[in-house]
Image: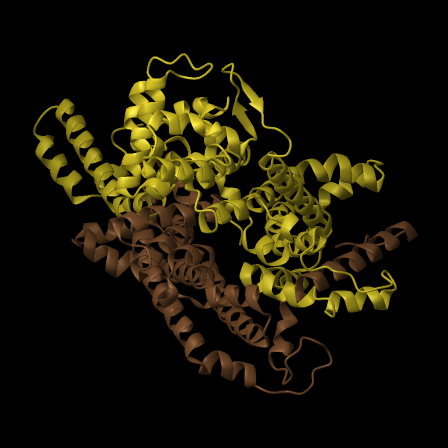
Chain colours: A brown, B yellow
Amino acid sequence: MLLSPYPTTGERIRITLLWLWCGMVILFLLVPILVPVPLSFNSGAFFIFPLEGISTRWYEVVLGTQRWQAAIGNSLIVAFGTTLIATILGTLTAIALSDEKFPGRRIVMPLLLSPLIVPVVITAVGSYLFYARIGLASTYAGIILAHTALASPFVVVTVGASLTGLDRNLMRAAAISGARPITSFFRVMLPLILPGVLSGAAFAFVTSFDEVVVAQFLASANQRTMPLEMFIGLREKLSPAITAAATLMMALSIVLLVVATVLARRGKQRPRID
Amino acid sequence: MSAFEPTKLDRPRATRDWSAANAGTAKSVAAALRRADLGDRLRSLALAAPLLLLLALSFGIPIVLLLSRAVYDPTIADALPQTSQALVGWNGTGLPDDAAFLALAADLRSNQAKGTAYELAKSLNARLPGARSQVLKTMRQLEAADRPPLEVMKAVPFWSAPGTWPVIESGTHSVTSFYLLSALDLRWNSDGGIERVPPEQAIFLQVFMRTFLVAAAVTLATLILGFPLAYLIASVPKGLAAILIVAVLLPFWTSILVRTAAWTVLLQKFGLVNDLLLWLGVANDRLDLMYSRIGLIIAMTHIQLPFTLLPIYSVMRTIQPSQMKAAYSLGAKPFTAFRRVYLPQVFPGVMAGCLLTFILCLGYYITPALIGGASDQLISNFIASYVNVELNWEMAAALSFILLVFTLALFGIFARILGLDRLKLV
């Protein structure tokens, strides 16, 4: 595609330069996220190549010490809570928005997306101020609520995308066959949009699991999440345990988001009544 | 809109109304359909209501509350009720009469008694640097009570200094523009006009400028790095393109914190970047890249690159290669064809990617906090430090207000010219 059938010298040079430049850009993209992986298996305490030896001692620190275990537990509580609420409410909202009769759709959509655009420090500081007054600061519920605001746009968008591919005649067929709306939702609509819903849930989980700024303002020492523990560790002293934690977090988000993307793609192709 | 679209008949309620109205006139059919329509609207609103309520609770109210702190600060008004009364008739120039001094003395003593002295001192200090120690000192002297209050007040030069009373007077109004003006390095002068604060007190304009400059530099860097790669991915065969796009998505899927952590490892004095620079002979000595502006920009560019690239790529994918061939066959030189045929079509994607990256860069907090030095902190870091370190909520709120105005204005432009659909990234 790039080269014409009879390339001139100028064209060859341009294409070679393009490939060289893009090769460098790809190295720039990939090397930084890959570097912590070998370092996390280093048996020494320094970040210098070549490695002193291979060991899993830093993973034992992250998975074995009480401080990190508590952080992982907190992260899981918050992320599962967020995923549950964001997925249910986000799916309902996406269904409502897919109805062209929904009043004020043009206003609601930008409002729903605004948590992704508003600088997260403003969201965090505002939640801290408000939750301190109503007794939600330093509680799991507070962090989950704030994370739900950040995570639900992803659910609304992915479920919305799978709804645009949904053939409404299927719902009409269910209604004509005598199904009540709730039955036709669970028996017809939900199975069809399930890939989109699961994809949104995976996005919501990762959003919450990776979030650190809101957690920093809302969590007390008892609710420190894994990213927060990493952030504090990075501020104090750079320990190789952080590279192990980073590798684990990276692996988890990549696996979940690969699944989410595959599901989202599949969610768009669906059976139709012709 | 036709009243007899099949879609109106699909719901049980509509069909029921339909059969009931069948015996009546066409008018009642229309009325029944309108009723059914209203029911549909209400039902879809009810489906969306839980999330909208939750967002109001966890996002809307917190932000409104925070922003209100920027303009509403009743601390001084609450602490100085008698002084507020005494200053009602004051014309704002020179010193107020002795009654105001006495009222202030009484207010200071009652604050001392109520235990709110420190709060008042802090609040006055935010508007009038140095006020804290003067307030606390005066309170101690009033407490001693060996002289009449008026004499004590007149003996402390601070209370007769030219700038003091206008600040107290403005503090007795709960709604204030003081913090918003301060966030832009402005203040009211004694003539009732707005002026710039003296250069030694000005900090925020510089921070806003720095934030914009870093955001612009990162946006430009991501465009220069991302545009050719997007072009390549859009031009190569499908299988290769899929591999290349994974190379873009892998870092995109990794959290900002993890990527910032990776860069703190790479940018160390004995880290990989310095190794590479030495090996290439670019630098003769190991550079201090951590806690520097250049380190910050490199890390932010890495994080933002997919945000710029993906919208550009999604537009490039839709452009037919035959158009460029047509341009060549009509005699256009490669550069002319690129400039006049390709670029105008890619432009919306470039705008979307760059605008998105610029907007997101304005709110960066984690990366400057971990990689930037003291002089590379962006506006978000100042907001956080006003909350965490200075405990000055009003100033944090005012800075948030201004940052939010810029962000939403740019978001508005984005939504207006490009449409929200371009926010979809994958």
Q: Nearer the viewer, residue A230 or B199?
A: B199
Quadrant, the N terminus of chain B: top left
Snapshot quadrant of residue B233? bottom right
| Placement of A43 over or under A172, stated as above or below | below
Direction right: furthest residue: A9
Asked if one can make out residue A222 in the rendered structure from this viewpoint, the answer is yes
| Placement of B18 over or under A209, stated as above or below | above
x, y percent for residue A221:
38, 66
In-image side of B322 versus B370 (left or right): right
Snapshot quadrant of residue B144? top left
x, y percent for residue B421:
49, 42
Q: Nearer the viewer, residue B170 or A45?
A: B170
In-image side of B235 versus A11 (left or right): left
Taking the spot 48% from the left edge, 37% from the top edge, the residue there is B404
x, y percent for residue B335:
82, 40
x, y percent for residue A12:
87, 55
| Placement of B67 over or under B250, stated as above or below | above
Taking the spot 43% from the left edge, 46% from the top edge, the residue there is B391
In-image side of A241 versus B146 (left or right): right
| Placement of B33 over or under B191, stated as above or below | below
Q: Nearer the viewer, residue A236 or B130?
A: B130
Taking the spot 55% from the left edge, 70% from the top edge, the residue there is A246
Q: Nearer the viewer, residue B130 or B379?
A: B130
Q: How many marks?
A: 0
